Image: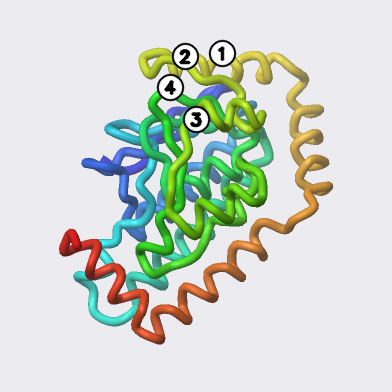
Amino acid sequence: MGVRLDRGAVAEVVIDFPPVNAVPADGWLALAGALTAAAADSDTRVVVLAAEGRGFCAGVDIKEMQRTEGHDALLAANRGCAAAFAAVYDCPVPVIAAVHGFCLGGGVGLAGNADLVIAADDAVFGLPEVDRGALGAATHLSRLVPHQLMRTMVYTCRTVPARDLLRFGTVLEVVPGVGLRAAARRVAAEIAAKDPVVIRAAKASLNGIDPVDVRRSYRFEQGFTFELNLGGAGDRARQRFVEGR
């Protein structure tokens, strides 16, 4: 259980927090550390970010927040998410997200910052943050879906299937779940066969021409999460979730 790093020219970073990959605060930091460690290896040419279990990622561990007094768990989760999302984006080699099942909240932050996404045919993407009394990762969702759909998904907390993202061109392939990891590794091998010096330069150049600073944009969103918590709305919404209401 936790975060696993399998090294190699195609490195794999695997999320495994049963039962639904709701990642605790220290898990986000472990994920950031694994991505950074993979990138620091000069032999690494591509990173595949994948997950075990029922879904790719259900976001933060809300139950952890509700059983922790004060705002320490919330602050730690927000810092951890920012670190993990940045580690995906700043990774000096391409990152391929292999997404299956649910990709929610923080999962969207990871997939939205990846260089490309391969999805299983059961994958769905969504931001349930409004129902949880929080805001964040619309920055990353806007890299996956058109702008007005992003707004609709934020306001309604609806999910969209991977096949819709395939039509938008933000998911490269949709494959049967049993073949997901192999499909991601196949594309990774194609990239890994290129000159690694040129690929790393390409990654740096593409980040440099992005129209939105994803780190600053996400932290701006997080500021509203803090406001909601100071006003009590965040805690009320999380408690409703924990109690199943």
Say which amino acid is labelled 3.
Ala
The residue carrying mark 4 is 121
Tell me, for residue 162, which label it has, or none: 3
Looking at the image, the residue that sits furthest to the bottom is 231
Q: Tell me, yes or no, whether the two marked residues, 3 and 4, touch with CB atoms within 8 Å.
A: yes
The answer to whether the residue labelled 2 contacts the one labelled 1, judged by CB atoms less than 8 Å apart, is yes
Answer with the quarter of the image where residue 205 lies.
Answer: top right
Question: Dot 1, how many residues are within 10 Å of its Cα: few (below 14), some (14-19), or many (20+)?
Answer: few
**How many neighbours does mark 4 have within 10 angstroms: few (below 14), some (14-19), or many (20 or more)?**
some
The CA distance from mark 1 to mark 4 is 17 Å
Residue 114 image offset from top left, x and y in percent: 60, 39
What element does badge 1 sit on?
Answer: helix
Circles 1 and 4, Cβ within 8 Å, touching? The answer is: no
Q: Which residue is mark 1?
A: 186
Q: Residue at x 30, y 70 (%)?
A: 237
| Numbered label attached to residue 182 | 2
What residue do we see at 51% from left, 15% from top? 183
Q: Earlier in the sequence, mark 3 or mark 4?
A: 4
**Direction from residue 236 to residue 67 in the image, left or right:** left
| Distance of label 1 from label 3 (alpha carbons) | 19 Å
Indicate which disc, 2 or 3, sits on the residue closer to the N terminus: 3
- At 52% from the left and 45% from the top, the residue drawn is 110
Mark 2–mark 1 Cα distance, whole angstroms, equals 6 Å
Spatial CA span between label 2 and label 3: 18 Å
Q: Specify which label sits upstream in the sequence, 2 or 4.
A: 4
